[in-house]
Amino acid sequence: MPSTELLIAFFATTAIFAYIPGPAMLYAAAQTMARGRWSGLTAALGIHLGGYFHVFAAAAGLSVLFHAVPPLYLAVKLGGALYLIWLGVSMFRKRTDAALPLIERKSARRAFFESVTVEVLNPKTAIFFMAFLPQFIDAAAAFPVWLQFVVLGTIVNLMFSSADIVCVFLAGAMVARLRRSGRAQRLMQRAGGAVLVGLGVHVALQRS
């Protein structure tokens, strides 16, 4: 494994990246605002599990393929962006219902599968792992390079997920105060949809 000094730099840099607000945190917050804290937590879990796709893909060299074949990267990026926009628009169109507990349970399951899909379709995550992790890989270490990728990638994924969970609880605290009002509930749902549409447009317009 890398030296102690390198590992300290790795943890410090990962923490900085993890707690800078990004698409995953905003996505989890949007789900919380639109569907409740439980849906936000299951969305964070889905993002976390989807992140392992990119961890193992980075270890296998899939990110190199994205760099080598730009049309593939563009296709996956646009697919993920369109999916985010579709989720956001669907939140705008969905009606609120008084039976909140049942809706939240059903929506939580949906949020989980949606968030896995969103994360898997996010090539930016793959590029991040491929660009970031090699800085802390020691080719001369006793462990093979692919195993170092998996171990370090898992640590990165866990740290990013901790930031997503913090964001969910902060959004949930705000939602709890506004939940009593049906009008506020509709506004929260639309705000969550707007965040998702904005994320989708942002991803689609990014050049790399």
Image (cartoon, rainbow, N blue to C red):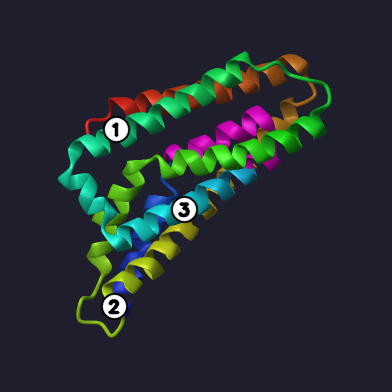
- Secondary structure at numbered mark 3: helix
Q: Is residue 98 magenta?
A: no
Q: Quadrant of residue 170?
A: top right
Q: Tell whether label 1 touches label 3 (CB within 8 Å).
A: no
CA gap, disc 1 and disc 2: 32 Å
Which mark is nearer the camera, 2 or 3? 2
Task: Determine which residue is flagged by label 3.
Answer: 160
Q: Tell whether label 2 touches label 1 (CB within 8 Å).
A: no
Task: Determine which residue is flagged by label 1.
Answer: 75
Q: Earlier in the sequence, mark 1 or mark 2?
A: 1
Crowding at label 1, few (<14), some or many (≥20) Cα neighbours within 10 Å?
few
Task: Determine which residue is flagged by label 2.
Answer: 144
Crowding at label 3, few (<14), some or many (≥20) Cα neighbours within 10 Å?
many
Q: Residue furthest right?
A: 99
CA gap, disc 3 and disc 1: 25 Å
Q: Amino acid at mark 2?
A: Pro
Q: Main SS of the magenta segment?
A: helix
**Quadrant in which the N terminus is drawn:** bottom left
